[in-house]
Image: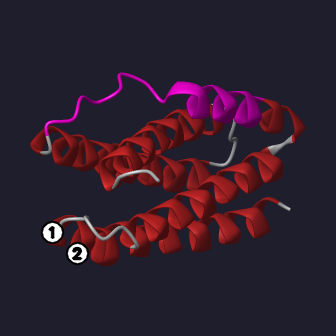
Amino acid sequence: MTTYKEELTNIFQGELAAVNAYETVIAKVDQEPVAKRLRDIKSQHEKASQLLKGWLQLEGQSTPKDAGTWGSFTKSLTKASSVLGEYSALAILKQGEEHGRRKYKELLSKADLTRSVREAISTQMLPLHDIHISSLDGMMKYTK
C-alpha cells in the first residue's frame, strides 16, 4: 500500500507530464483561440506542480526532476496524436485530465493526508480538472 507522500510524488510527476503534453500540442495547434486556452491550462498545471513540489518539500520528500516514465509515455502519445490532427491531440489531453482527476480523488482517500492538502485538492485541484475537461470538450467540438 502506498503512502500519501508516494501518491503525491506520482501526482507531481503527472503534473510535469501534463505540462510537457500541453507544450507538445500547443506547438501543433493552428487556431489561436484553442492555443490560448491550452496555454492557460498549461500554466495552471505549472502552478499545480509548484504547489505539489512545495508540499513534498515540507514533508521532507525529494522531488523528481522530470515526469519519469509517465512523462515519456505521455510525450510519445501526444506527439503521435498530433500527427493525426488537433482533435486526436485534444482527446489525449482530455484523457490525461481525467486520469489526473482520478489520481487526486484517490489521494483524498488516504487517511494520513494532511488537512491543508486535502482542502487544496478538494477546493482547487479537482475543480480545475473539471474545468479543463469541460474546456477540452468544447475545443474538440470546435475542431471537428
* 143, above or below 43, in the image: below
Q: Are marks 1 and 2 in contact (CB under 8 Å)?
A: yes
> Which percent across, then down, holds residue 60?
14, 37
Instruction: Say which mark, if any, is on residue 28.
Output: none
Q: Determine which residue is flagged by label 2.
A: 119
* 113, above or below 10, in the image: below
The secondary structure making up most of the magenta span is helix
Instruction: Say which mark, if any, is on residue 116.
Output: 1
Q: For the residues marked 1 and 2, what is the alpha-carbon distance in whole angstroms?
A: 5 Å
Mark 1 residue type: Ser
Q: Nearer the viewer, residue 60 or 99?
A: 60
Seen at 86% across and 62% down, the residue is 144
Q: How many marks?
A: 2
Seen at 41% across and 75% down, the residue is 127
Mark 2 residue type: Glu
- 130 to the left or right of 63: right
The segment highlighted magenta reads 60-79
Q: Nearer the viewer, residue 53 or 39?
A: 53
- 73 to the left or right of 71: right
- 55 to the left or right of 30: left
Seen at 27% across and 48% down, the residue is 52
| Badge 2 element | helix
Query: Pointer 2: residues within 10 angstroms few (<14), some, or many (20+)?
Result: few
